[in-house]
Amino acid sequence: MLLRLIKHHTPGDLNGFLKFDRMPNNKTDINNNNAFSTDMIGMNWNYPEADYATRAKITKEHELYNKGLLYFIGHDPRMPEHLRKQMLQWGYPKDEYTQFGNWSPQMYVREARRMVGAYVMTQANCEGKATVEDGVGMAAYTMDSHNTDRVIVNGMVKNEGDVQIGGFGPYPIAYRSIIPKAEDCGNVLVPICLSATHIAYGSIRMEPVFMVLGQSAATAASMAIDAKQTVQQVDVAKLRKPSASGLATNTTAEILVDNDDQQQVTTTGNWEKIKRGAYGPSAYVAAKGTSGTVRFTPAVVRSGTYRIYSYVPKQPDLTTHTNIKISTDGKSVKPLNFAAAAVKVEGQTSGEWVDLGTVKLAKGGKGYVEITTDGADGAVVADAVLFIPE
């Protein structure tokens, strides 16, 4: 099938059917791309209800399929020569998974069994048409489903099931979606296989989301144990309230100031908001030839030395140098800048954190980071600024 496809649509490079996301150390995280690729479409249906032996068999079949696909692309003489040569530039990572023949032993299970809990997250939640009040984590990814089956229609092979709908901002995930209905069970929390429709789960199922839902579930479990309550009786308002230090370890927390934090961000001049590629709901952009500033003022609860990072969504017309002013006391100012060339985006992301160095900030002080359009020869972006305690 791959040969038939390439015969009619010969791509110029491997990205025609393999999604190469560049990673550090000259590596790549390959994903499925277009009509015939790394997805073994329709061959995973038995996985959710299978026993361990059957799951191991399905995993092995997927491993052999992908190993065979990569080998076929690089070695079969029927493949176009330029694609074979490109494929042979790559190999398994010599320093990873060494006990498994340099191949990951873990298959990515995107979605299998899911709980039907006290609340079901749906497409309406993702798109902001329905907003829950008991949110214990945020999600923001595109509603994403790969193809689920291959069918024959009038003698032609068709894939079906692919959905890619995005363009919405972060949205809260209900505490009720990680707990069962009260009549089903009172002592279980489910932060991964949570209660969500197929399309909503395609957005929620990202590892950072699982991490925050796992933390929320663990906190809720502790609260239920201490109060001798069921998980349904947990005081969600108390669960949602952050600790005084921001961290359970009582160490100094990172300080994130996003451009959407109105109380901590002030602007002058002409800035437009973009919603694609930003950290959080949006980012500010000043077009070439306009003037203005965006000032990020952190709420410092502990004095100390902080390393500062600015998030920069990659823009095609980004100014070659972005000028920044940093003040530790609201009076004295230290100018610096970073080059557009320093924004090296790797992996599945559209921006990167740029290191601005370290500063000493006082508790309750008036320190700030200000992004300006001074001296810009292109667009200036102001998105999020992160202060990490040293």
Image (cartoon, rainbow, N blue to C red):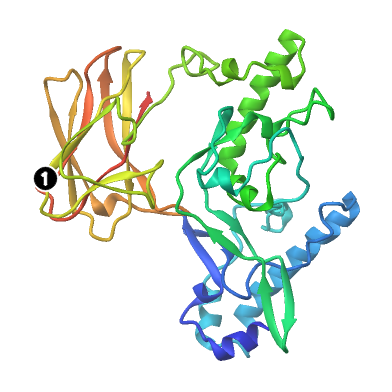
Any part of residue 29 in sight: no
Residue closest to the eye, 73 or 117 = 117
Task: Please say if 187 is above or below 274.
Answer: above
Residue at 26% in and 54% down: 341
User: In this picture, is 308 found above or below 347?
Assistant: above
Picture residue at 48% right of the left edge, 18% below the top? 246
What amino acid does circle 1 point to? Answer: Ser
Furthest residue to the top?
Answer: 227
Q: Indicate the position of residue 314 as horizontal and vertical percent values.
A: 32, 54
The picture places residue 104, in percent across and down from the top left corner, at 68, 54
Placement of the N terminus among the 4 image quadrants: bottom right
User: Residue most toward the front?
Assistant: 129
Q: In the rendered image, which quarter contains the C terminus?
A: top left
Residue 238 x/y as whole percent: 58, 15
Vertical relation: 203 (above or below) 32? above
* Closer to the camera in the image, 216 or 232: 232
* Along the viewing direction, whichever of 315 and 338 lies nearer the viewer: 315
On the question of residue 215 being in view, the answer is: yes
In terms of secondary structure, where does tag 1 sit? loop
Q: Quadrant of residue 329?
A: top left
Residue at image x 84%, y 59%? 46
Q: Residue under label 1, please give it.
A: 291
Q: Is residue 140 left or right of residue 312?
A: right
